[in-house]
Amino acid sequence: MEDTICVATSATLADPERGTDAAKEFAARFFGIQANNVEVVLEQYVEDDWAAKRRVPRSLPGDPREHLKNLLEAVESGDDGGALVRIALRAMTGEALDEDAWQEDLYNRLAANEMVYQIAQALRHPKSQERPRLWLSVEDVQEAAQKNQREQYHPLPVTACNTCWQHYFTLHVKDFEFTGQRPGGGDAMGEGQDYSCFLSGREG
């Protein structure tokens, strides 16, 4: 066993009271080795390295939807991503990325972009909101709807698997197509009600 290296990963590794000792003991029992032979590797966060001087980018020329489409294709293109990113950036800004070190060049440009910086700062901490609200029982939703009939409530029934207790929406999709890399079409249906308008963000 000493010649074999066992690797295990977990999203809930540390115990609130005992730290990583509980994980070491579990790994020792699981792999049949001594606890002092278990090494726990934790994550290390690195702060973003923003440029000291940043600038607000100019408005995008053309159709923003076309730019987004080109960027998504670049992300999904694998080995051709660098070339497609350079083409997309030139179309949006008129500037060219370094062909041999496009990742580093792109990082430096984003680090000097004030809009990207502000978005990153806004996403560092969750913001409290009055809506949307979540109820964990149908009865609570019905009671809330009766108290405030001016509010619109869009129920999405949730149930749980009897075996693994994984939660899921009790919906199915009709007229669903999946040809190529992206799904297309389809209306979400459930319990005799059409949920397609709710899922797309429109009120029906």
Image (cartoon, rainbow, N blue to C red):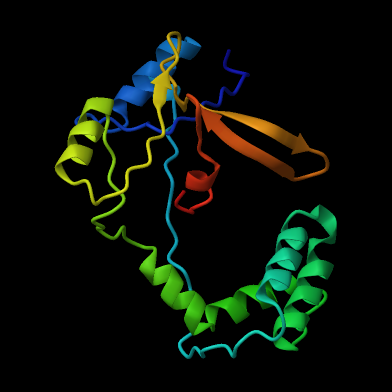
List x then y, in percent, for residue 172. Answer: 58, 27
In the figure, residue 137 lies in which quadrant?
top left
Asked if residue 39 is positioned above or below residue 200 in the image, the reply reads above
* Horizontal arrangement in the rendering, residue 96 relative to residue 122 (left or right): right
- Determine the residue positioned at 46% across, 76% down: 117
List x then y, in percent, for residue 121. Answer: 38, 70
Instruction: From the viewer's side, name the closer residue of 151 and 91.
Output: 151
- Determine the residue positioned at 44% across, 69% down: 120
List x then y, in percent, for residue 102. Answer: 74, 73
* Horizontal arrangement in the rendering, residue 149 relative to residue 167 (left or right): left
In the figure, residue 70 lies in which quadrant?
bottom right
In the figure, residue 189 lies in which quadrant?
top right
Instruction: From the viewer's side, name the closer residue of 194 and 188.
Output: 194
- Residue 137 visible somewhere in the drawing: no
List x then y, in percent, for residue 146. Answer: 18, 38
Asked if residue 13 is positioned above or below residue 46 in the image, the reply reads above
Asked if residue 42 is positioned above or below residue 159 in the image, the reply reads below
- Residue 80 visible somewhere in the drawing: yes
